[in-house]
Structure formats: structure tokens, C-alpha cells
Amino acid sequence: MNEFWHIEPRFEAAVKGYFAQPPQAEVELEFPVPEKDFNTAGNGASETKNLLKRLGVDSDTLRRIAVAAYEAEINVAAHSKGGIMKCLIYDDLIHIRFQDEGPGIADIDQAMIPGYSTADELVREMGFGAGLGLPNIKKNSDALHILSSANNPTTVELLIFF
Amino acid sequence: MTLNEIVKLLEGEVLIPDTDLEIEVPCAFASDMISDILMCTKEPTLLLTGLTNNQVIRLSDMIDVIAIIFVRGKQPLDDIVEMARERGLPLICTKMTLYRCSGILYNAGLRSCKI
């Protein structure tokens, strides 16, 4: 499997500490993300944002979480055979994990290049396929971890601190 | 610039009755690609687009969209208009192209949204 990590330097210690020993989440949410279902795709990101808004997370952070989660949710719907979005919410951060059923990303570094897209015609007709999904996720996250390879499931997880 | 001035400049049609057209619009962004639009995380913005599907309305759950101008005479379906009405999101249609709309608004002093 190929691995990609991006961690904002000021959160390096916090991110490593978190993954070394993940604590018990205060709230857990789970959303199915069916393949090519653009009617429901984005529900998970919307509902997560609404919950965090009620919990008092500031609007700039909310927007970053919503955009990162939405892009990742659309990626699962557009490019995979479907998957699950799972949110772990803590006092000071959110950990969102996307696990799909393949077919995987052959070259993660290439997928990170703005403008590179493998979206099919149906996906492009919806207005997706700009090749900015992963770059937008990276830009809005404090930590991004991708684990994938061709013909395998993909895991994308991100952390955003409040 | 108010939304009302924008509607007049673009010869637009307001799709939702009782829309508040006196709201102030500080900046605008134009694109037909969802991920491009999602780069607008820094400030509330007017959106000009030729996309009329449900995901365009859903964008306003993620970022602060003040109103949407549908260009090139594109008309969203009733359920899309209903989604926007539930969210209090003004929708406007114009027959003008994206390029023409952008040029007119830019010349009238409406600046580009910060990304």
C-alpha cells in the first residue's frame, strides 16, 4: 500500500500524539456514501457541520471542516464502489475517516496535483472533476493521511483542530 | 453593490418570490466546477454559474454563498428552487453568458472574492 501524510508543522506533536493513542471520542457519527449517488452525497458533511455549529465551533473552522469533509465524501461517491464516512468528535478536534471498497488510487502524489482528475463523464456533468478534491482537502485540514494502492480499498482520514 | 443592482445589470429574473434584494454583495466568484467554487472559504460571496443541479445548492451548506446567478439561460428544476428557498438562498436567472456577466459586474465595481 502507498501512503501519504501531510501535517501542518504547528500540529505535528498533537497529531502524532493523537494517532499514537487515540482517545475515546465524545461523539461518533457514521454516514454511508453510496457509489455515484449525488442526491445524498454531501449529507454527511452537512450534518456534521450542523452538529459542530450547535456545539459552538467557530465559523472559520466550521467552513474548513465542511469543505474538507464534502470533498472527501464526493470523492468516495465519484471514484469508489462506495464507502463509509466516520466522524470522531472531541473537545478540541474532529477526526473524519473515509473507508471505501476500492478500486484504489494508483499514484497518490499524482492525485494530489491540482487539476489532475480521473473523473468520468457522469461525474463531470455534475460539475465535479476539477482535479481539486484532494488539494482542497489538504488545504483545509491540519492533518491528512491517505492509504491506498491500485485494486485496493482507500482510507482517507483528516484531523482539524477547533 | 446590492443584489437589486446586480439583477438590473444582468437583466435577471428572480426565481423565489419575496427575495430580499437590498442585501449587500461585496464580491463575486464565477465557475462551472464545484471544487473551484469550494476554494471560496474566506468570505461570503455571490456565485455565478451554469450548474443547476442539487450539489450547487448544497455548496451553500459548506461555504457562505450570498446568492446564485444562473447564466446562459439555464433554469433549475422546481425541487432545486425549493432546496434554495428552504435555505433562504436567493436564485437569479440571466440569459447572458458567464463571461459577459462577469465583465459587466467587474466594470460596475464588484470585486473578485478572496480565495
Image (tube, coloured by chain):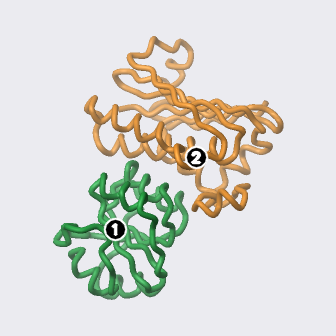
Residue appearing at x 73%, y 55% in the figure: A118
Q: Kindly give the residue lying farthest to the left in the view shown.
A: B22
- Numbered mark located on residue A162 in the image: none
Colour used to depict chain B in the structure image: green
**Structural distance between the alpha carbons of marks 1 and 2:** 24 Å
The amino acid type of the residue labelled 1 equals Leu
* Relative horizontal placement of residue A53, taking residue B62 as reference (left or right): left
- Count residues near mark 2 (Cα–Cα under 10 Å), then give few for <14, some for 14-19, many for 20+: many
Assign a secondary structure to mark 2.
Answer: helix
Q: Report x, y in % for residue A44.
A: 48, 36
Residue appearing at x 47%, y 12% in the figure: A23
Q: Is residue A60 above or below residue A115?
A: above
Along the viewing direction, whichever of A31 and B111 lies nearer the viewer: A31
Task: Indicate the quadrant containing the N terminus of chain A: top left, top right, bottom left or bottom right.
Answer: top right
Residue appearing at x 40%, y 27% in the figure: A93
Q: Report x, y in % for residue B115.
A: 42, 61
The residue carrying mark 2 is A74
Q: Is residue A108 above or below residue A87?
A: below
Residue B98 seen in this snapshot: no
Task: Indicate the quadrant containing the C terminus of chain A: top left, top right, bottom left or bottom right.
Answer: top left
The amino acid type of the residue labelled 2 equals Ile
* Relative horizontal placement of residue A143, taking residue B90 as reference (left or right): right
Q: Chain of mark 2?
A: A
User: Dividing the picture into quarters, in which one does residue A77 lie?
Assistant: top right
Q: Report x, y in % for residue B79.
A: 42, 57
Residue B97 seen in this snapshot: yes
Along the viewing direction, whichever of B103 and B5 lies nearer the viewer: B5
Chain identifier matching the orange colour in the rendered picture: A
Residue appearing at x 43%, y 43% in the figure: A66
Q: Is residue A65 above or below residue B103?
A: above
User: Which of the two discs, 1 and 2, sits closer to the camera?
Assistant: 1
- Numbered mark located on residue B91 in the image: 1
